[in-house]
Image: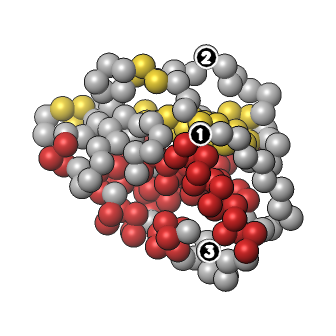
Amino acid sequence: RLFCETYFPNAFNLAWSDDHLKVIGQMEAVLLNGGLFALAMPRGAGKSTLTVRAAMWALLYGHRRFVCLIGATEKKAEDLLKQFKAELIYNERLGADFRQVCYPLQRLENNGRRCIGQLYDGEPTRIEWGTDQLAFPVMPDEACDGVNVSGYKISVAGLTGALRGQSHVLPNGVIVRPEVAILDDP
């Protein structure tokens, strides 16, 4: 709730209902501890908005290293990732508090081809920028305020898309698979 209110006041500008607060609490519990959680709410109640922000919260605070967001279709999934990227690039509040992630992404100027040549202190940032994935920049600990989320990743897929076999190599060589899958509007 605090993450949503602090960084996305335009998206969450109405009073929270008891149901919203219950949903946020369950999302947080699953993202921190694992488990299953199904959510049904009426159209326009903020399900997609909450799921994108939940994925962002889990990654930016280092609770999860690899999140897979699953949309009803490939196009819907890609739209969720566009929202995710747009917030990291254009949201000034996020940019101020999560500079080690947001600033390198902002410098790409929404052009994924610039990932290859981007350096920080002479080292590649290794950002992966695609229509179906985003891997956070690799930054040294001294460039990070708080938790270093270098190389953490979000991928998206449609409900009938390629969900199996996803993996990602972190900067330290550890291979991770999606630690949580969030389905939006299946």
Residue drawn 52% across the image and 46% down it: 32
Q: Relative to 174, say whether 124 is above or below.
A: below
Label annotation for residue 12: 3
Please name whichever residue, 112 or 146, is drawn nearer the observer in this view of the structure: 146
Q: From this viewpoint, which residue is outermost toward the top?
A: 165
- The image quarter containing residue 165 is top right
- The image quarter containing residue 164 is top right
Q: In this figure, which residue is indicated by the disc labeled 2? A: 165
On the image, the x and y values in percent for residue 68 come to 60, 36
Q: Relative to 68, say whether 59 is above or below.
A: below
Q: Relative to 154, say whether 173 is above or below.
A: above
| Other-residue count near label 2 (Cα within 10 Å), few / some / many at <14 / 14–19 / ≥20 | few
CA gap, disc 2 to disc 1? 20 Å
**Residue 186 vs residue 2: left or right?**
right
Local secondary structure at mark 2: loop
Q: Amino acid at mark 2?
A: Gly
Local secondary structure at mark 3: loop
On the image, the x and y values in percent for residue 55 come to 56, 49
Residue drawn 74% across the image and 34% down it: 158
* Quarter placement of the C terminus: top right
| Upstream in sequence: badge 1 or badge 3 | 3
| Upstream in sequence: badge 2 or badge 1 | 1
Q: Amino acid at mark 1?
A: Gly
Q: Nearer the viewer, mark 2 or mark 1?
A: 1
Q: In this figure, which residue is indicated by the disc labeled 1? A: 34
On the image, the x and y values in percent for residue 22 come to 69, 65
The reply to whether residue 11 is visible in this rendering is: yes
Label annotation for residue 20: none
**Residue 160 vs residue 155: left or right?**
right
